[in-house]
């Protein structure tokens, strides 16, 4: 019996270790796939930690399940009516009650320590190399790069009729977020109307964009994802078009990012100039 139990435990642990994260998309793009049974492929240090911790939790849960089922089976066999013609009148056992109260506490504390460690790790980075500000609107995202003359653009979903071959439905946008690999990126979130949520499972990011408030986290995308697109979507019920707020991050090398910034500053300059002009007109009318 003990040998069979050991083999079962080793099989469960081995399965947890060898499970491969899901990776979908014709170009290796990172997004959910039909019938996906595991987490998305981790693309950042935070996601690496979360995926590994999730596997560890599954092992702990499996061990608890096996222990409880084995204990119940033993009790059903050992204390059946057939083997106990005279029922016991025992109603309490102080030792057992102390054990099944204290043991779960130790298990929870043992899980609390790494959980808080991961939580603080994902909170923010003191060594940010660049900042991306994300603003939620009904129903689209606005992105600002404060380190690059406040480069700003909107990102809206592409309708199904305008999709090109290989572009995922309800995830493709007209202007992708461009981010460099191996760069500590500070992420700031806010909203202009209601609460939105910027969620990217492969980066283990899921943070609310709240009106009148700035929420912060960070990420660092692994170098092997250069040239790929990471997809996500709004995960807060923000209104009738909640399902039409996809997120698409185009991951590039640092050199390609610097080249893109120069082009983007020209491409979105007209919108920026128009915005500045509108602000100046509003100020002039206010000062009259």
Image (cartoon, helix red, strand yellow):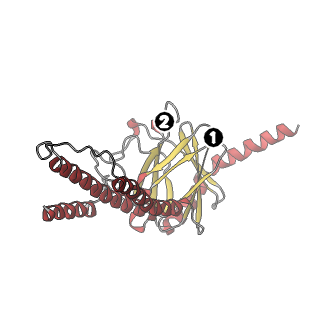
Residue 226 in sight: no
Q: Residue at x 51, y 60 (%)?
A: 122
Rendered image: mark on residue 192: 1
Q: Residue at x 40, y 63 (%)?
A: 48
Nearest the camera: 206 or 64?
Answer: 64
Nearest the camera: 73 or 40?
Answer: 73
Q: Which quarter of the picture shows residue 100? A: bottom left
Q: Secondary structure at mark 1?
A: loop
Mark 1–mark 2 distance (CA, rounded to whole Å): 15 Å
Q: Using residue 172 as the reference point, say whether residue 264 is left or right of it.
A: right
> Which quarter of the rendering shows the C terminus?
top right
Question: Mark 2 — residue?
Answer: 242
Q: Using residue 82 as the reference point, say whether residue 120 is left or right of it.
A: right
Q: Is residue 271 positioned above or below 185 on the image?
A: above
Nearest the camera: 153 or 44?
Answer: 44
Q: Position of residue 43 (x, y in %)?
A: 41, 61
> Which quarter of the rendering shows the N terminus?
bottom left
CA neighbours of label 1 inside 10 A, class few (<14), some (14 to 19), many (20+): some
Q: Position of residue 165 (x, y in %)?
A: 33, 46
Rendered image: mark on residue 125: none
Q: Residue furthest left?
A: 82
Q: Is residue 149 positioned above or below 247 on the image?
A: below
Residue 73 in sight: yes
Q: Earlier in the sequence, mark 1 or mark 2?
A: 1
């Amino acid at each position: 019996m003990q040998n069979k139990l050991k083999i079962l435990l080793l099989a469960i642990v081995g399965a947890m270790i060898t499970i491969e994260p899901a990776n979908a998309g014709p170009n290796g793009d990172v997004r959910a796939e039909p019938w996906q049974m595991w987490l998305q492929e981790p693309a950042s240090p935070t996601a690496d930690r979360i995926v590994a911790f999730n596997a560890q939790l599954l092992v702990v849960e499996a061990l608890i399940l096996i222990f409880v089922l084995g204990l119940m089976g033993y009790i059903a066999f050992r204390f059946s009516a057939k083997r106990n013609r005279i029922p016991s009148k025992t109603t309490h056992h102080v030792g057992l009650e102390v054990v099944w109260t204290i043991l779960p506490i130790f298990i929870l504390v043992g899980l609390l320590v790494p959980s808080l460690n991961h939580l603080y790790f994902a909170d923010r980075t003191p060594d940010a190399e660049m900042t991306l500000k994300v603003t939620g609107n009904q129903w689209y995202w606005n992105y600002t790069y404060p380190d690059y003359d406040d480069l700003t653009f909107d990102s809206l979903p592409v309708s199904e009729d305008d999709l090109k071959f290989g572009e995922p439905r309800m995830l493709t946008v007209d202007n992708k977020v461009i981010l460099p690999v191996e760069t500590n990126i500070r992420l700031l979130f806010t909203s202009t109307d209601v609460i939105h949520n910027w969620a990217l499972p492969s980066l283990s990011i899921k943070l609310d964009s709240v009106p009148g408030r700035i929420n912060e986290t960070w990420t660092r995308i692994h170098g092997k994802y250069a040239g790929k697109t990471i997809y996500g979507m709004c995960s807060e019920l923000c209104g009738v078009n909640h399902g039409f707020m996809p997120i698409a991050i185009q991951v590039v090398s640092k050199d390609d990012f610097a080249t893109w910034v120069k082009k983007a500053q020209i491409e979105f300059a007209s919108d920026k100039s128009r915005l500045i002009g509108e602000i100046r007109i509003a100020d002039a009318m206010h000062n009259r």
